Structure formats: structure tokens, C-alpha cells
Amino acid sequence: MSKFELAPLPYAYDALEPFIDKMTMEIHHGKHHNAYVTNLNNAIAGTEHEGKTLEELFANMSKLPAAIRNNGGGHYNHTLFWNLMKKDGGAPTGDLANAINGAFGSFDEFKKLFSQAGMTRFGSGWAWLVKADGALKITSTPNQDNPLMDVAEIKGYPLLGIDVWEHAYYLKYQNRRNEYIENWWNVVNWDAVAKRFAEGK
Ligand code: MN
């Protein structure tokens, strides 16, 4: 039976310096994400859930054990997160830029609202930009939940997400989540977001 695997980062561990430091990336990917993959494989081994895709698991999340929810979400969210970042991120263009301006008024206003969603997520979790029935929405989820799960308050296809767990920023920013989020905008891979915008419904 095929197992979930930890893919290498699509760039070097120090590629996002100075905004996200090398040691944080090494621990975040090599330890935290790796543990989600290991624990997910252990949670599904020998059960009826072995061989299902993450999306299939998320659709029935409310009926599944917490270990699958936490580690399946952790695996999906982090795989997405690594691919939504790159050195020299830039800004959205084309259809995506138009959709953001249409939904939120301007790119600056979108950044403000998305950052607020990350700042006001109490404890550990994620802030998201999702596409739902063609509309763009900002939301946040606790722990390793995501908007693909049936338990999510606002559901949709995640286009952009930021990890606001302390492990994502504490080594460099300590308690200053606001500085982490502000600096993170420098490394958003808008080409990847635009690709998801085009494929999402
Ligand atoms: Mn994380």
C-alpha cells in the first residue's frame, strides 16, 4: 500500500532569508512536517482509510479520528505552504489581481484583512484565501484544519495560506506574529496562487 511521503522543499532551506530563516525552515520541514507524515501513515495503517487521498479523508473529516484530522491536515497544509512561497515573491497580476481587487477593493485592503485573519487566530492555526463557488473569501482555521474539511466554518479551495503556529516564526520573531506576517508577504509565490485560482471552482 502506498504511503504518504515528505517531498523535499522546492528551494534551499535558506532561500527565504532574511524573511524566514534557515533554521526555522529546517526544523519546520524536517521535523514538524516530517512528523505529520509519519503520524498520518501510522494513523491509517491497517485501517479502511489506507489508500485514500487527503481530499477524500477531508470530505469525511467529522467522522474520522483526531490523529487523521491533525496529521492529514498537517501534511496537506505544509505541502501547500512550501509551494506557496519562493524567493522574491512580487505581487498578483492578471485575472487573480482583478479578482482580489473586485472582492476586497484593493490589494492593500486584501493584505490587511488576510493579515488580520492570521493575527486574530487564537493559538495555533492558519489563515486562508479560498475560492468558493467562484467567490474569493478570507478565513482562518484552528490547529491543522483547512477549508477542504467538512468541519470547516468556511469551506472552499485554498489558494493561499499562512501558518501562524508559533513553530513557524518563534525562532526569529519570538512573540511578534505581526512582524512575521508582514515580512511573509515578501515571499508569497503569486504564480502558484494564480495557478490555484485558475484550477479552483
Ligand atoms: Mn507548521
Image (cartoon, helix red, strand yellow):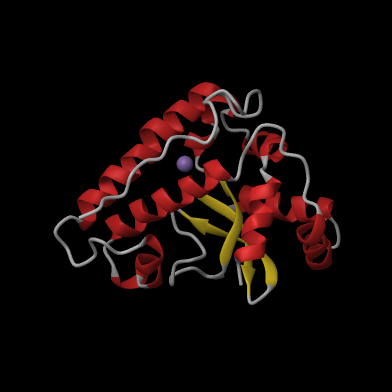
Point out residue 191 in the picture as x, y percentages from the top left corner.
69, 48
Residue sitting at 77 percent across and 50 percent down?
Answer: 92
Residue 179 occupies which quadrant of the picture? Answer: top right
Relative to 195, residue 21 above or below: above
Q: Give the residue displayed 28% in from the left and 55% down from the top.
A: 67
On the picture, is 136 further left or further right than 71? right
Whether residue 192 sits left or right of residue 165 in the image: it is right
- Residue at 26%, 46% in the rendered image: 39
Camera-side residue of 71 and 98: 98
Residue 154: x percent and y percent?
A: 56, 70
**Quarter the N terminus occupies:** bottom left
Can residue 123 be seen at all in this image of the molecule?
no
Q: Report whether 29 appears left or right of 115.
A: left
**Identity of the residue furthest to the left in this view:** 46
The C terminus lies in which quarter of the figure? bottom right
Nearest the eye: 199 or 161: 199
Residue at (71, 38) in percent of width and height: 89
